[in-house]
Image: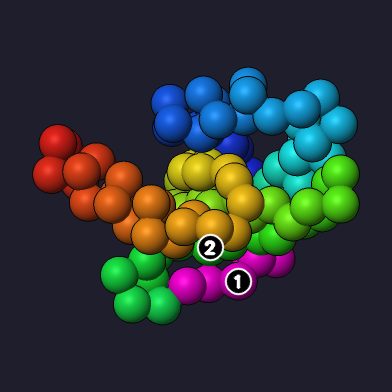
């Protein structure tokens, strides 16, 4: 049974700004993640609850960050972007998001 997906507002905003070709490739990646969320790479340290899947589109590499909730079989998409400062920005975003909850 496929997992249920949801996305934080930051992810949706960044997704809308991507070129159409990249959005299409991202749709395929999201579908693959929802079929098997453990396909990505689990991060360590401050981002230990985050998984990242990499994909290529328009001769660039993109990263999709997500969290897995096994209890309710939900994948929460956190961020999409290219590698430059991706992890640093993601860590900052998660800290502000957690302090706001």
Percent coordinates x, y for residue 33 in the rendering: 70, 51
Residue interval drawn in magenta:
37-43
Q: Is residue 94 magenta?
A: no
Image quadrant where residue 100 sits: top left
Would you say 52 lies left or right of 92 here? right
Query: Residue at horizontal 59%, vertical 59%?
Result: 83
Q: Is there a contact, CB below 8 Å, between mark 1 and mark 2?
A: yes
Up-down relation of residue 32 to residue 39 (above or below): above
SS category of the residue bearing label 2: strand
Up-down relation of residue 6 to residue 99 (above or below): above
Query: Residue at horizontal 51%, vertical 43%?
Result: 79
Percent coordinates x, y for residue 4 in the rendering: 59, 38
SS category of the residue bearing label 1: strand
Q: Which mark is residue 50?
A: none
Percent coordinates x, y for residue 71 in the rendering: 43, 53
* Residue 58 visible within the image: yes
Q: Earlier in the sequence, mark 1 or mark 2?
A: 1
Where, quadrant-wise, is the C terminus in this rendering? top left
Q: Which mark is residue 51?
A: 2
Query: Residue at horizontal 58%, vertical 43%?
Result: 80
Up-down relation of residue 31 to residue 61 (above or below): above
Front residue of 10/19: it is 19
Query: Residue at horizontal 58%, vertical 36%?
Result: 5
Residue denoted by label 1 = 41
């Amino acid at each position: 049974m496929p997992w249920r997906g949801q996305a934080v507002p930051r992810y949706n905003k960044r997704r809308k700004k991507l070129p159409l070709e990249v959005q299409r490739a991202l749709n395929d990646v999201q579908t693959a993640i929802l079929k098997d969320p453990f396909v990505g790479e689990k991060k360590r340290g401050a981002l230990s609850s985050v998984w990242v899947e990499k994909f290529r589109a328009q001769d660039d590499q993109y990263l999709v960050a997500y969290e897995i909730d096994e209890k309710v079989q939900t994948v929460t998409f956190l961020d999409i972007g290219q590698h430059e400062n991706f992890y640093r920005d993601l860590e900052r975003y998660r800290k502000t998001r957690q302090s706001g909850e």
